Image: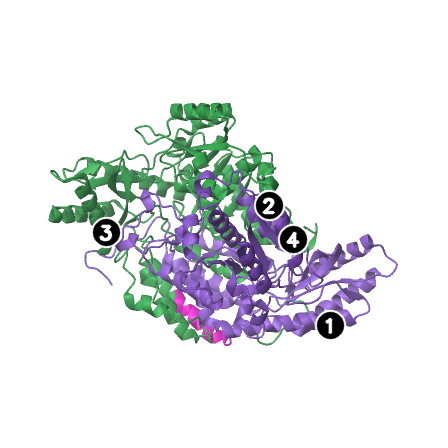
Chain colours: A purple, B green
Amino acid sequence: MRDPTHPTRGPGGDLDPEDWGVFESAIETVLRASLEKMRTASEGRVWTPPPDGLKQRLVEPVPQAGLPMDALTQRLLELLPYGVGNTHPRFFGWVHGAGAPGNLLPEIVAAAMNANCGGRDHIAIYIERQVIEWCKSLFAFPDNSSGLIVSGTSIATIIAAKTARDAALSFASRAQGVGQAKLTGYVSAEAHSCLARAFDMIGLGTDALRTIPVTAAFEIDLQALTEQVRRDRDNGCTPFFVAGTAGTVNSGAIDDLVGLAALAKAENLWFHVDGAFGASAITSPDLAPRLRGIQRADSIAFDFHKWMHVNYAAGCVLIRDGGLHRNAFANRPDYLAANGEALAGGDPWPVDFGPDLSRGFNALKVWAHLLEHGTDKIGQSIAKNCQQATYLGERIAAHPDFELLAPVSLNVCCFRYHLADASDAEIDALNAKLVARVQMDGIAAPSTTRIKGHLAIRVNITNHRTRREDLDILLTALEGYGAGSA
Amino acid sequence: MRDPTHPTRGPGGDLDPEDWGVFESAIETVLRASLEKMRTASEGRVWTPPPDGLKQRLVEPVPQAGLPMDALTQRLLELLPYGVGNTHPRFFGWVHGAGAPGNLLPEIVAAAMNANCGGRDHIAIYIERQVIEWCKSLFAFPDNSSGLIVSGTSIATIIAAKTARDAALSFASRAQGVGQAKLTGYVSAEAHSCLARAFDMIGLGTDALRTIPVTAAFEIDLQALTEQVRRDRDNGCTPFFVAGTAGTVNSGAIDDLVGLAALAKAENLWFHVDGAFGASAITSPDLAPRLRGIQRADSIAFDFHKWMHVNYAAGCVLIRDGGLHRNAFANRPDYLAANGEALAGGDPWPVDFGPDLSRGFNALKVWAHLLEHGTDKIGQSIAKNCQQATYLGERIAAHPDFELLAPVSLNVCCFRYHLADASDAEIDALNAKLVARVQMDGIAAPSTTRIKGHLAIRVNITNHRTRREDLDILLTALEGYGAGSA
């Protein structure tokens, strides 16, 4: 590769290491400590509050002079113990992935390449395309479908909703705005807030996203949906979009995607699926049938960083009709024109499919993660988490002090510690306290939500390190705290 | 830190390495090759087209079984030579940062922590806050201003424009949509396409963003702007937003930000500054006066991954009135409620200031980069690039075969090879060919744009590795190709 017209130069650029030996030794130190952190991910406390002293040391003026390497190394290493806790097997809060050490391999390569994946003709673009091809094949999407690696389901949802918006308005909306179009969309009352956020972002407003009641299984009520669509048409609105959820955040419920696909077709609605974590279950032969209908979606939004455990942040949007997708985003000024050859080739560019123009090489860690583990192992881990949630649900149901607040559909178990002769407010306060306590003690990290108005202890298991004994440890701790508070 | 109630466990999770020795050896291999790639960033070809064989090997079914570590390592390492080229000192295309090896330190730590920076009380949140505080201080923003680390200026611009939109509509737009509000915004004809894209995204449409002519210096014509605002008011529109550019992509021009600030105040417009790369010049005492007026902006969007050379992707939005910013994005459902204590504390959360709910720990590499180098060194490198662009402009102006197409304002030099007795179309075609040729030969990577209708060879110097001799090498190559084609 060495070209004689490009002789070896002396020292590097202004921001290259002054001394590569010192730099490599710093890398070695940081690497050792980071590997140790990863190797012991299942040990010790789940979460430790960041110490006041450390927080205070962060407060300093913007640095004008640089730090020596050893000082920088120390500044970095002292942060390691004070993460969110999601790498630990007893982290059950929100919907966090646990990450995987193997991600370090592509992260190192990506740092060396420092590729901007907005476009142009270089290998990173081909890697991203291949990841998208893999995702299309997982969901049996057609050849002319398209996709983009994004930061997560929130942006994926905005991209999908904008494509649906523009398609509904013959793309005149891109220039003219949404104006007086009375477009209406539909989600269940259990849908994630990212959908309302997308409607807010794209100018339709959250009121235009109708909230449909759910069944006892926390799934969208198709009858109520049909009636709402009818009512909106009667009132001069233009229904254009419906989102089904594959794995609600509160309880893991999966909407009837086959029913939604049929309804969307009959009513001429764009059928979006929010599969933020649940879509990953497509990798499990046991669970994939639960997602039936997702293959008929017009768009799917999901994350790699949740149940697939790619490190933060990486998600994906898939759009069935790649032409519509491109029409909603393509817009290249002179300085981004494709030259048709050389570095400015490689058409189409990712910038034609989403809002970002500069884009990191996030696709690399997704690609390497799937190559390293394969979908079988990922699917088995996902299925294991669902079995664990079922186990926890059974233990809760059989326990005199706990009350199950929602059926366990997938990987989420919502329950509460119950007190006889206490008001609802007192029970809510107690359960909030139990969650805070078990977090503060470093034993486990469930989060809270509300189910039918009750504050719930929410145990979400998207964690390849969790074992049954971890759930037992959580219950034992909650039992103890609950008994002590009662 | 080890807690006796949490005994050491056996092997790790489903996606942890099966054999840590093998894994660490793979890390070592990848690290060696990546460090060598970084150490020799100034050598060899600028860009090499990805070989067909490699591209074809990427095309394979979604992997069901995982790869052994050594095979995965080889798959990753064979990508290294085929990046964009932006790490090389003769990469002058578009506006790419060159990156810095030091970023590997925080990337390793971030991979070990795998923090989700959407919210909660953990150290990553405090790091991001501190980076925002530093940025506020660089631009003399007030205490109650706010900010967010984002993927880049495109998203930053969307966040700023949405905040401005909602503030103009008393935040009713979040629920009701933009409807019939005839909001109009203003940018120069040289403004970046991300501004029109933002207007498209947020439902106002690109027509609502008026394009104002530029002066001979490619700066927004304030008189023409004033007249357009007047005309729009007369026609029943509501002018609400004006964006100045600090460093246009075509020619590096900086709008009269003081004049814009005054006009925005007089006309009651939100004053946004697109400082994608140019805002970084605030770190150079020589250049900072050129940005005068930026301190009066209502919002600033800029990138760390361009002229500051943080690795992709990292940008920032700052909003003068943090309350407006939060009002435009805050929206927490039950499952994201702040508990006030323990892990769910740490209010406010970053999710209250932007569209993403899951967020990677991008702030760490920005923080570490600023600590490692300090703003002085970064500013010196930026000033050096401007001197280099001036030097190139002087050489072009003095050269019989080249024609300077725009004054060199900052770090961009646009010119073309000139042919006597040739049509405009022939000259355009020749210059496109020269750019492709110099890229294909691996000698340098300028890009193209159009200046006053002419296809320009565009040399953008946001590169801490560039030296004057690199510009001489580029010119010599272009001269040779040009003479050969004439």
Task: Give how far apart the Cα atoms at labels 2 and 4 are.
Answer: 16 Å
* Residue wearing tag 4: A227
The reply, left or right, for residue B423 in relation to residue B285 is left
Whether marks 2 and 4 lie on the same chain: yes
* Residue wearing tag 1: A394
Q: Tag 2, which chain?
A: A
Q: Tag 3, which chain?
A: B
Task: Give how far apart the Cα atoms at labels 3 and 4 are.
Answer: 59 Å
> Mark 4 belongs to which amino acid?
Glu
- Mark 2 or mark 4: which is in front? 4
Q: Quadrant of residue B378?
A: top left
- Residue at (38%, 37%) from the top-left corner? B191
Crowd band around label 3 with a 10 angstrom C-alpha radius: few (<14), some (14–19), many (20+):
many
- Mark 2 or mark 3: which is in front? 2
* Residue wearing tag 3: B436
* Residue wearing tag 2: A208
Q: Nearer the viewer, residue A385 or B91?
A: A385
> Mark 3 belongs to which amino acid?
Ala
Residue B124 in the image: state x and y as whole percent: 56, 53
